[in-house]
Image: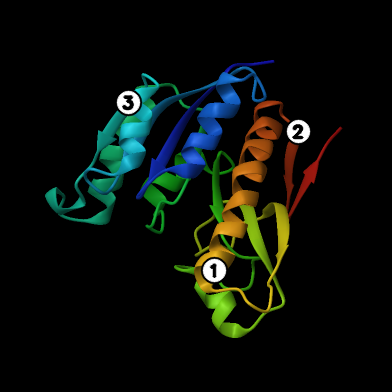
Amino acid sequence: MNFTNIAVLVSGRGSNLQSIIDNIENGTIPHASVKVVISDVDGTYALERAQRHGIEAVFVDSNKYENKASFENEILHIITQHDVGLVLLAGYMRVVGPTLLTPYKGKMINIHPALLPSFPGLHGQQQAFDHGVKVSGCTVHFVDDGVDTGPIIIQRCVPVLEDDTANVLANRILEQEHKVFPDVVRLFVQGKLIIEGRKVRITD
């Protein structure tokens, strides 16, 4: 089995990042290592999490670049320095453009806090709660050039209870995110994910 270097893009506190790091360190995700964590927001707790584990943590300020392509080209430059074979979007709050996506098509995975294709984009948990759904959950999918439209790998469902608030629902979904995201990373590293059009086949 080949060893997989991972880059993680973040914008916030990085709890999903932590779940990936923990599962690598405890051996649940073998033959993999998070080499760099990149944030588009300065001072995020995700960067501190990375530093605590000896992982390179980088803030890239989009305001310093004249356009999205040049901003993403800087991120790409950082990633390629680490011979990365998998890019994870773990609470990264930007739509990835072709500069970054094209080199990693089929090797970039996002986690979304709703059952796609319903409630894409920002605040999926709040969208679902406001819509009055009875079941919500999370989706892990390959990234394409749309907004949360890439081929779905795994989804996990959670009930929406009568006395839920949006925050309570979001926390229930997050518990599943912390389980399913490492599962998907492990399957990718093991070469068990095959994209067939709109569908992702998981091999034995």
User: Where is mark 1, residue-wise?
Assistant: 125
Pointer 1 local density, CA inside 10 Å: few below 14, some 14–19, many at least 20: many
Pointer 3 local density, CA inside 10 Å: few below 14, some 14–19, many at least 20: some
Residue 198 appears anywhere in the view: no
Q: Earlier in the sequence, mark 3 or mark 2?
A: 3
Q: Nearer the viewer, residue 104 or 141?
A: 141
The residue shown at (57%, 73%) is: 119
Q: Is residue 3 left or right of residue 202?
A: left
What percent of the width, then of the height, locates residue 199? 75, 54
- Indicate the amino acid at tag 2: Lys
Foreground label between 1 and 2: 1
Residue 197's image quarter? bottom right
What percent of the width, then of the height, locates residue 23? 60, 28
The residue shown at (51%, 73%) is: 126
Q: Are marks 3 and 2 in contact (CB under 8 Å)?
A: no
- Indicate the amino acid at tag 1: Gln
User: Where is mark 3, residue-wise?
Assistant: 51
Q: Earlier in the sequence, mark 1 or mark 2?
A: 1
The residue shown at (38%, 27%) is: 80
Q: Nearer the viewer, residue 2 or 158?
A: 158
Give the alpha-carbon distance from disc 1 to disc 3, as whole Å. 29 Å
- Indicate the amino acid at tag 3: Gln
The residue shown at (71%, 26%) is: 190
Q: Is residue 103 above or below residue 138?
A: above
